[in-house]
Image (cartoon, rainbow, N blue to C red):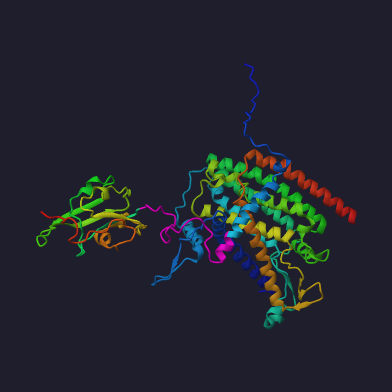
Amino acid sequence: MSSRKPYVRKRYWNEPEMGWYERAYFFEVWRGMRITGGVFLANLWKFMTGRKGALTAYYPEETRADYAAHNRGKHILTQRPDGRPQCVACNMCATVCPAQVIEIDAAFDPDDPTHPRYPSRFEIDYSRCVFCGLCVEACPEDAIRMVKETPDLPGFDRDRMWLRQEELLNWQPRQDVAKPYPVAGAGRTVGAP
Amino acid sequence: MSPGLAITLVYVGYALAVLLTFGAVLTWVERKQAALMSDRIGANRAYLRIPFTNVKLIWLGLFHGMADGLKLLLKEDFKPVTYDKLGYVLGPWLAFTPVVLVFAVIPFGGVLDPGRLFPSLADWFGGRTYPMQIAPLDAGLLVVFAFGGIAIIGAMLAGWSSSNKFSMLGALRAGSQMISYELVMGLTVIGLILIYGTVDLNAIVQQQSGTLLGFLPAWGIFYQPFAAILFLTAGIAENKRIPFDLPEAESELISGYFTEYSAMKQGMFMLSEFIEIAIIAALFTTLFLGGYNLPWLTDAGFVFPGGGTLALAHGWVVVIQLLTFLGKVFLLCSLQILIRWTLPRFRWDQLLSFAWRFLLPLSIANLAVTALAVWALQ
């Protein structure tokens, strides 16, 4: 049998020292309950007078006020004056997309010689989108942009989290967009041969 | 049917309704109060849709309790392979039943004179009056402790028969904890028995109906403030809630002695926990807060110290007494939930040394001082 030293617990430099007041437990319990009870009563009073006594937000119903000014949560497709998409279905955004969430079907419109290629289907899967903005960077036609709002997406089904072309085109020109949107006849002619 | 039986049946119905309502509503109160205490909103998603319309009733999340109950009822009742089927099935019932039965001896109102409430039935009742208490027993307080002892068996049996080591450990902890705190509880209450000279709960409440020194209501808490704190502490420990929830400490023992229970069997443990909150509040109200007594309220109405009186009909007095009792119980339930969401859990050795080396000497000292005072005053 080896002689073992009795175990001595290590004392740490920042170990709290408790006097009789702390050891008596009930005083400190009383102090803690005054704090939590005060918070409870204050929040209850706020709630009963119709104010919000909480730091959390009702997520889908309520938009947080403290989103960053440069937060971009939704894509839009810019339009030409006749309302048709600026997009020429070149698939560059779909190619650069790291999450591979953009799906485009290209179509040909012989009646529009300056802009014959257009997307017949342009869909984004928001359940997988990482909001990196690379699609906006990649677009040669300034056809896809991101705006500040967040799409109304929460749901019980992943299949419902796709935004289709109609919704991407359904936007109102916003004041927070720095660049003016392309206007017909101004600047370069888009899609000219 | 004899009038006495009819009255007792009404009381039993009232008691069951009150207890089950408390059990259901306290789940909601606990969620919402915890949320408000920590600057959150709380559960508010469950709703009841009025059929054929799009109107959704949310009502501050009150239907979450209903959703929980429905879920517990419809879940698979998984049974472990255990060597003691009978004990496994009996466990939840032995934990649940004594908790509910305790309410039988608690007076939840003053004296009921049904002949005056229903004049058409006055002949049948023949002027008899009934105290609002299901079982007006002389040994009321002893019955409370007897049933408290049975509840230990429920937890122990559940843990033992689950053939799971976590359940086993939880049951051992539950047993030693409840026995320790039962002792503290009993010794604190003896001081009250010395003062009131009876263990009949109805007599104890009636003795608390006057005033003390002219302005304080003559409630037990003013005679025995230490005993009140000790009783509440021991009561929360009996109920195995935070900070005394070692038997079901989820970070160590999954959920302790009811780890192996699922569906409504587990629901019964939860329900009995929530009902026991109400029972402890009711016991505390009865022993320390004057039960159904409001200051200056007598059977004839309010009699104010300045000499003013406000005569009330018998029916109103009964309603005020019932509501007073329920209000006090509800406030105490809220206090218990406040404690549960404020304090951190004890360590196991701290728990037992707190009972044996702190609360027990305090309760004995309280008892000794009370005994000396009572002896000196006689």
Quadrant assignment for the N terminus of chain B = bottom right
Foreground pick, A101 / B47: A101
Q: Is residue A89 above or below residue B106?
A: above
x then y, percent, for residue B371: 84, 51
Q: Quadrant of residue B23?
A: bottom right
- Magenta stretch, main secondary structure, is loop
- Against B330, residue B301 (above or below) is below
Quadrant holding the C terminus of chain B:
bottom right
Horizontal and vertical percent position of residue A191: 14, 55
> Does the magenta segment cover residue B224?
no
Q: Is residue B318 above or below residue A96?
A: below
Identify the magenta region.
A43-71
The spot of residue B32 in percent (x, y) is 54, 59
- Residue A170, quarter of the rendered image: bottom left
User: Front-most of B192 and A152?
Assistant: A152
Verify whether residue A46 appears in magenta: yes
Q: Residue at x 46, y 49 (%)?
A: B78
Q: Nearer the viewer, residue B76 or B351?
A: B351
Judge whether residue A18 can be spotted in this image.
Answer: yes
In the rendered image, the residue lying farthest to the front is A187
Left/right of residue B285 with respect to residue B50 in the rendered view: right
